[in-house]
Amino acid sequence: MFKTGLRLTLAAAAFGTMLSTAAFADGGLISIIVTDPANPYWLTEGNVAKATAEKMGYKANVSAHKGDTNAESQMIDTAITNKSVAIILDPANADGSIGAIKKAVAAKIPVILVNAEINQEGLAKAQLVSNNAQGAALGATQWQKAMGDKGKYVELFGNPADNNAATRSNGYETVLSQYPDLKKVGKEVADWDRTKGHNKMQSLLQANPDVNGVISGNDEMALGAIAALKEAGKLANVKVGGFDGSPDAVAAVKAGEMAYTVLQPVAVFSEKAIQEADSLIKTGKTGADSEKQLFDCALITKDNVDKYTAPFTLSK
C-alpha cells in the first residue's frame, strides 16, 4: 500500500525540496486548497498533492482556508478566475462548503474532495477520505488495552463542522461502551487545535483531578493535552490516545508519552486525488467505482513505531 516512490516524495516534501516541473507544465493549473499547513497533516496533504500534480505535468498551487468558509469561497473564485483545470479541496464545512463547490461546478471545473466530506453527493467528482470509523475502532481498542477495564477518562472532540469529528467520537463510543467501568467524565470541543487541546485539558483536570485517560479526535489536541498533563505532573498516570500519525505524535509514542496514534494515509489519498483529477481531465472519468472512497488507517504503537519512515507513512 505504501510505495517506495511515495516515501521518497514524502521525504522530499518534508525537507522542502519537492520535485518541481512547473516550468515545463503544460497540462494546466490544478488548484489545491487545504485547511491549515501549520498542522503537519494538512501540510503533507498539500505538499504531496502539489508534488504529484507537477510530476504529472500540471502547474499547481496550494492555499489554505483555515476553516473559514468565506476564505474558502474566495479561493474557489480565484481558482475559477485562473482557469484551473481541477480543484482539490479539503472542505472547511460539511454543509457550508457546498455553495463554493457549486460555483466551481457551474464553471465546469471538476472538484475532488480530500480528507473531509460534504453532506451532498453528486457535486464533487470524488470524495477521498480516511476510513474514520475503522480507524476509531482501532484506536479505541488499543486505548482500552492501555487503560484496562476500569478508570475515568475524558474526550477531546474535533471541529463539529467536520463530519470526521463525530465519526471518530462515535467509533470510540461503540468500542468503549462495552466496558461499563470505563467512565467518561468529561468531553470538550478543541477544534483539532493543540493550544485549545491544552486549555481544554487544563479545565478538564480542574473538574476531574483523578482522571487517568484521554482519548482524542486528533494528534494536535492530544499533544496539547499531554503538555497540560506534564504541567500538572500527572502524565505518568494518564493514558493518552491520538489520531493522525503526525511526526510529533510518533515522537510522543516513542517517548512513552502517548499510548498510540492512528495513522491516516493522507499521503496516499492526496496522491490518488491528483491521479483521479488527471483521469477526469483526459477521459471525463475518475476511474474509481464510486464518488466516496475510504482508505483504511493503521495503528502506530511503541511496538511498531520504528516502521514509521516519513510523514504519514509506514514501511511494510
Image (cartoon, rainbow, N blue to C red):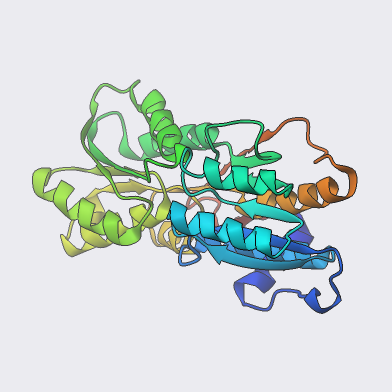
Which image quadrant for residue 283?
top right
Residue under the image location 38 percent in, 39 percent down: 143
170 lies left or right of 46 = left
Residue 239, percent from left and from top: 31, 46
On screen, residue 64 above or below 102: below
Residue 306 visible at all: no
Residue under the image location 56 percent in, 60 percent down: 75
Q: Which of these two is toward me, 123 or 127?
A: 123
On screen, residue 91 above or below 57: above
On screen, residue 87 above or below 50: above
Q: Which of these two is toward me, 105 or 119?
A: 105
291 lies left or right of 198 = right
Residue 180 visible at all: yes
Q: Farthest residue toward the right?
A: 283
Residue 77, percent from left and from top: 59, 58
Residue under the image location 48 percent in, 62 percent down: 36
Residue under the image location 40 percent in, 26 percent down: 175
Residue 210, percent from left and from top: 13, 43
